[in-house]
Amino acid sequence: MTETIHPDTLKALVLEAIPDAEVHVSCYSGDDHFEMEVISATFAGKTRIIQHKMVYAALGDNMRAAVHALALKTRAVE
């Protein structure tokens, strides 16, 4: 059986790693498929790949257990 995680927990993990972020998380298609948008000044000058790696690092082991799918959008504050 797979662990479950609440979207608010995922949001808190990202905010812990990227405190200035604006984070929106929603669940779709079951308990382990998520959509997430992260907007942060910290992303300025970083490639999208680096931005995504920062978010994945914040989510840690949840990406191997509780999160089966993550539709992730990141961008720097405009």
Image (spheres, rainbow, N blue to C red):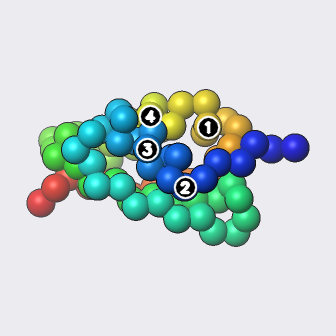
Disc 2, SS: helix
CA neighbours of label 2 inside 10 A, class few (<14), some (14 to 19), many (20+):
some
Residue that lies at the very extreme toward the left in this rendered image: 78
The residue under label 1 is 62
- Between the C-alphas of marks 2 and 3, the distance is 9 Å
**Of tags 4 and 2, which is closer to the observer?**
2
The residue under label 4 is 58
Q: Position of residue 64 (x, y in %)?
A: 67, 36
Indicate which disc, 1 or 2, sits on the residue closer to the N terminus: 2
Q: Are marks 4 and 2 in contact (CB under 8 Å)?
A: no
Q: Are marks 4 and 1 in contact (CB under 8 Å)?
A: no
Q: Quadrant of residue 57?
A: top left
Q: Are marks 2 and 3 in contact (CB under 8 Å)?
A: no
User: Is 62 left or right of 54, judged from the image as shown?
Assistant: right
Type of amino acid at the residue the image marks with label 2: Pro
Type of amino acid at the residue the image marks with label 1: Asn
Residue that lies at the very extreme toward the right in this rendered image: 1
Type of amino acid at the residue the image marks with label 3: Ala
